[in-house]
Each structure stands twice: as structure tokens, then as C-alpha cells.
Image (cartoon, rainbow, N blue to C red):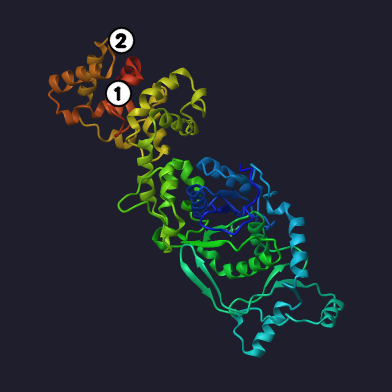
Amino acid sequence: MTETAPDTTAPSSTTAPTLRFCPSPTGTPHVGMIRTALFNWAQARHTGGAFVFRIEDTDAARDSEESYAAIIESLRWLGLDWDEGIDVGGPNGPYRQSQRSEIYAEVIEKLKAGGYLYPSFSTPEEIEARNVVAGRPKQMGYDNAERDLTAEEIAAFEAEGRAPVWRLRMPEEDLTFDDLIRGEVTFKAGSVPDYVVVRADGKPLYTLVNPVDDALMGVTQVLRGEDLLSSTPRQIALYRALVELGIAAQVPEFGHMPLVRGEGNKSFSKRDPESDLFHHRERGFIPEGLLNYLALLGWAIGPDRDVFTMAELVEAFDVRDVNPNPAQFDLQKAEAINAQHLRMLAPEDFRARLVPYLAAAGLVSAHEDEALTEREREILDDAAPLVQERMTLLGEAPDMLGFLFVADGALEIDDDARKTLKDGATEVLDAAVAALESLPGDAFATAAIEAALREAIVGGLGVKPRLAFGPLRVAVSGRRVSPPLFESMEILGRDSTLTRLRSLREELAAS
Ligand code: GLU
């Protein structure tokens, strides 16, 4: 948390920017939303600026506590930390809009007193009827007709029992700003009608509270989705009013990030499971891999380079390098990058991260590494290095390693593994059992196991090496594909290995 007061000076190249992430807590965290958080975070960390996290929960009908908690959990899981805001506090709290009503009421009074807002009594039907008469296209919306109501006109409406909404007076000139990602953007004078910022019940709308909070929290750079670009001229107009009133120090710079699209360039809707951040966590993406991939949705660290750490991202990131074109979420590429990050983990770290996935599948007794039984720890110590290079997602762990944790009698043999067993399988199993029986328990180690089995099966039976060990793999792991066989046997130990070999042998004899 930064102890400094909010920045009240105009932004300059020598002042580090203040950025923010301000999601609305509706539904489960969306991948596009997290990409927004990531770019704001990266920009703050790269520049040495501040990162503020607030929650825009002004829509009681759609917002939920569950979603609020899920957003916090997602940032914490990913390691996107913030300097000011939710949970950590700071000088400009509270950081949930639902708790800031008094602050907004005060600002609204100042805006009214300054003449920036005016009351508007027209119903939607009245506005439409006026547009029809004036031959004004419907999509142009409100016609600014009530800008200069007299006190008598206002009194007359009130006498009818009408309560007004309040609109912000839009400037009558072109509105231009220099988008950090898109360059110069201009909205023509008159293209944006005076818009509602306060409801008839006195409650402010998102269009007011979002810029007001940015102003009060000293935000100097706003990076957000391209879908919000059309609301930016309205926000800038409000900002100018806030600057004139001394409430805002400056109009922030804006950068509108490219949309994230789904497979086949479709929109990435909340219904699409791939848009759900936690879906990827469940499958076993690690934060490093997922964040790396999300950073590629609109940004690149350099030509022909896809894999980087968060430290490297922070070092290199500049929002001005973000590409404005839509970015498509490509699950295969995301997985390939995740696999690379799994390989980059320190062995103990990788091993510890397998535990929750094994626990979720009921294969180990606890979700934390420290709470495992000694035997479980022993298996994991030896088995994790065997799969670190082979795994794409941590969620593959139960399938790859499950056979090492289940009791011999509970091992299930997959159908496709069983199908690989040829006629000679019984002889191979018999030879293996005999060879391993003659290997004493204290010599039951990978190299000795391999030597004994090669001699018995390749040497003794004359089976081609390529075919010699298939039946043993099936017996021991129940799978057609498994981690390295002799290492797996060593981990299981002599008794368990022999029990499994005999068990398949008996099964084949009976069939
Ligand atoms: N609460 C808004 C949203 O979730 C944020 C808009 C903004 O970043 O300005 O879309």
C-alpha cells in the first residue's frame, strides 16, 4: 500500500501514472476482464506508478457478493497485486461504489450548482415524438430540448408530479483525445446527446460514478475495453466539468484495448466456458502460463517470442505498443505456453502444485503438500520429476499419476490399454514375474529392474524391445501410455509391482 496522498498534479512524463481496475461484480471472472486487469497492472508496474482496485457495484439487480469474492480470489490467485483499494485500503476509500453514496451526492450538488447538469422531464415517448416531428433519426436519441427550461417551466412539470432525471450538458465542439492505443480519436460536435447521470430517484448512474471515482482516486491512465469507447466522449465532458470545479486534477489519458474474441472469431460471451477464468484453473493452467498467454492478446514482447515471465513482461510492457485489432483466444496456443511454464517451475514448486489436483480426484489425503502422508510425499517426490516435462495442464496429474496412489486391487485397466495385449502377453508377464522375484527388495531400483527385465524378456524370450514392455506397462499402470516404466516400478516397490503383474497374468489366464 502506498502511503502517499493522491496525486494532484497534472500528468507529465516525469510523474508515474495511476491506473485502476474497476470491474462490476456480475458473474464469474471473465478472461477478457482479467486481460484488462493484467494490462493495467503491467503498465503500473512498468512505470513505477500505482494500481488501484475498486469495485463498481452500483447495479444491485445484477451484482452479487459471490462474484465480488470471485474477482478478488482471481486477482490473488494470479498474483496481480494492487497498491490501493479493496482489502488493502488507502486514502480514497471506501473502494466499493455501493458504499460511496454520500460522496456522489456531494459531487452531484456541485455539478448542479455549477450549471453542468440540468433537469430533464421528458419521457422516452415524448422524446421519440419530438424526433419524429423534427425528422430526426431515432438512433440520435435525446434532442437536448430541455437545456434552457425556465423556472416557470420547471415548476409546471413539478406541479404535474414529474421527477426529473439530470443530464450533463455536452460541449458544442468536436471532442478529440489521443488514445494511448489508437492514436487520435474524434467525436463530432452534436454526435453525443446530453446524457443522464442522475436518475429520477436521485441515484447516480455508472456514467457519473465511474469518472468521479477516477477523479477522486487520482487516476491518470484509463485502460479499458474497446466496447467502452463510445462512452468516452461523455466521460471526458464530465471530467472537464470536474476539473473546472476543482474536483479532478486532470482529464486522464485513455487507452482502449482490443476485444478478446472466441474461437472462430465469435464474440467471447459469458456462456462460452473458455471465457471463464476458473475453468482454466480447474483444468490446470498455472498463473504464469495463463498470464503469459493473456498478455499475448494484443501485445507482444518481441518478434518470434511467445514465452516470458511476469518480470520480463513488467520490464518490457508499454501500453502504447498494444495492437488495436481484435485478438482471438486460442486455447491450443494457451496450453502450449502453459506447458512451457510448467517446465520452467522449480521441481519442488511443480510438485507442490500437483497436490490440489490429485486431492480433487481423491488420490491423496490432503490438499496441501505439508498435510500429505509420508508415503504420499515419497511417491510424489519421485514421481513429479517423471512428468514435469510431459504435462500441459496440472489437471492431467490424476490421469498420469493416479496408478501410483491407488491400492493394487483398485487399479483399473483401461480398455484401450487392454486391447494392446497380444498373444504373447502371458509369457512376457510370467518372465517378468520370475525375473523380478529373483531381485531382492533392497536392489529393486530402476537400473536393476530394467536390466533384469531386458535380460528375461528381450534376451530370454527374444521379444523385440519395442514390444517387450507393453504388457508390463498395462499391468502396472492400467494405461497404454504412462510415465517411464522402470522408474514407476521402483516407486511402487517390489511387492506392489509383483502383485500387479500377477494380477493381470491371472486375469489373462482366466479369460
Ligand atoms: N465497471 C466497468 C466494467 O466492468 C468498468 C469500466 C471502465 O473500465 O471504465 O465494464
Q: Is residue 509 in view from this perspective?
A: no
Which picture quadrant has residue 197?
Answer: bottom right
- Mark carried by residue 487: 1
In the figure, residue 244 lies in which quadrant?
bottom right
Q: Quadrant of the N terminus?
A: top right
**Residue depicted at x 85% and y 75%:** 161
Q: Position of residue 266 (x, y in %)?
A: 44, 62
Q: Nearer the viewer, residue 189 or 60?
A: 189
Residue 6 x, y percent position in the rendering: 64, 51
Tell me: residue 195, above or below residue 353. Answer: below
Look at 77% across and 60% down and name the residue there: 106
The image position of residue 287, as x and y in percent, is 46, 42
Q: Residues within 10 Å of mark 2 (few under 14, many from 20)?
A: few
Badge 2 amino acid:
Asp
Q: CA distance from mark 2 to mark 1?
A: 15 Å
| Kind of residue at badge 1 | Glu
Q: 41 left or right of 467?
A: right
Q: Is mark 2 within 8 Å of ligand 1?
A: no
Residue under numbered circle 2? 442
Q: Ligand 1: which quarter?
A: bottom right
Residues 28 and 324: in front is 324
Q: Residue 335 location in percent, x, y?
A: 38, 46
Query: As drawn, is 49 to the left or to the right of 126?
Result: left
Residue lying at the far right of the rendered structure: 159
